[in-house]
Image (spheres, rainbow, N blue to C red):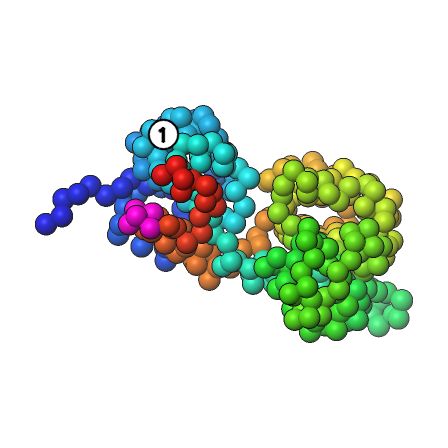
Amino acid sequence: MDITPKPKVYITREIPERGMKIIRERFDVEIWPDPMPPPKKTIIQKVKEVDALVPMATDPIDKEVMEAAPKLRIIAQLAVGYENIDIEEATRRGIYVTNTPGVLTEATADLAFALLMAIARGIVEKDKYIRRGEWKVAGHPMLFLGQQIYGATLGIVGLGRIGSAVVRRAKGFGMKVLYYNKEPRPDLEAELGAEYADLNVLLQKSDFVSLHTPLKKETYHMIGERELRLMKKTAFLINTSRGNVVDEKALCRALKEGWIAGAALDVFEREPIPVDNPLLKLDNVIVVPHIGSATYETRSRMTELVAENLIAFFEGKIPPSLVNREVLKTR
């Protein structure tokens, strides 16, 4: 009978059962039970004896947390992004960091295109209009007009997995697609029917601009006042990437003063977005609470990937979605 103690894992939120069942079978698990994130001081207290940590993208996993966890060997994040983790510090300490890429591509692309369609036709505001009892005239040819999607030009900023998936949806609507990427992707241009464009040109020519770039030093506020002023007055901005890619103060001005027609946002500079954020007072904005991956299937598959990363590590294998491959030189 094997009496070897199971590795200890601390999970900072309740996660879908499909992956949780796998983790429970192989590990000694403790889960933070509250829907609200655990305070940082709680994470520091809980990691003191753990071998593995499963955080969410909103949990700050920095040097202070790692110093409190002498046994910590792997951080298996339940998210694609990992801006909340001090990767350099983790690597220096020989701590593996993994994420959950790929599995949320289609769900996030679905949401991006849903937001594009909803903002183009003013779906949310017109729903409110009816519920307020203001619909008094039927069939008037000048009421409730929106922008046509079919045949419009879509600008994709970041032609990675999700950006490419949005392009595939756009082709079904006969859209012309321009894209901007750090490096051109001729391998995808023929397949997707997308045309590379300088960012300035893309902003000037697109009827819809959809952001799919990771948050890095060079992409912080990459869409600011100058970029928004380049866009058409009839154009819409859709952001399902990271909130800090857009300068929200500049966006608010753009929407108030009519530099652009509207915006649809899944992500914000501060999350949850404060209720006094001026964006929430504007009718030409649709907002949703960072739900790109929020489908039953996708979240379940993400937790399975967390489990696969943990199991691979503790079996002495390289985890399937290792972020800091430099750590292999350390441990």
Question: Residue at 44% across / 32% down in the picture?
Answer: 92
Quadrant in which residue 21 is drawn: bottom left
**Is residue 45 placed above or below 101 in the rendered structure?**
above
In the figure, is residue 55 to the left or right of 223?
left
Q: Of helix, strand and loop, which one carries label 1?
A: loop
| In the rendered image, the vertical position of residue 271 relative to residue 290, given as above or below | above
Give the amino acid type for the residue marked by disc 1 in the picture.
Ala
Question: Which one is nearer the viewer's eye here, 154 or 284?
Answer: 154
The secondary structure that dominates the magenta segment is loop
The residue where tag 1 is placed is 69
Residue 271 seen in render? yes
Q: Is residue 232 magenta?
A: no
In the picture provided, is 260 more to the left or to the right than 300?
right
Give the quadrant of the C terminus: top left
Relative horizontal placement of residue 28, taking residue 323 as reference (left or right): left
Q: Is residue 229 left or right of residue 159?
A: right
Residue 248 x/y as whole percent: 73, 40
Residue depicted at 65% across the width and 50% down the height: 213
**Between 43 and 160, which is closer to the camera in this rendering?**
160
Using the rendered image of the protein, determine whether residue 210 is visible from the camera's viewpoint: no
Residue closest to the far front: 329
Residue 235's spot in the image, x, y percent?
A: 82, 56
Q: Residue at x 75, y 73 (%)?
A: 174
**Is residue 315 a member of the stretch shown in magenta?**
yes
Position of residue 161 relative to residue 309, above or below, is below
User: Percent x, y for residue 67?
Assistant: 40, 26
- Label 1 neighbourhood size at 10 Å, few (<14), some (14-19), many (20+)? many
Query: Is 31 in front, or is 198?
Result: 198
Q: Position of residue 225 (x, y in %)?
A: 81, 41
Which residue: 70% across, 57% down? Answer: 184
Stretch in magenta: 313-317
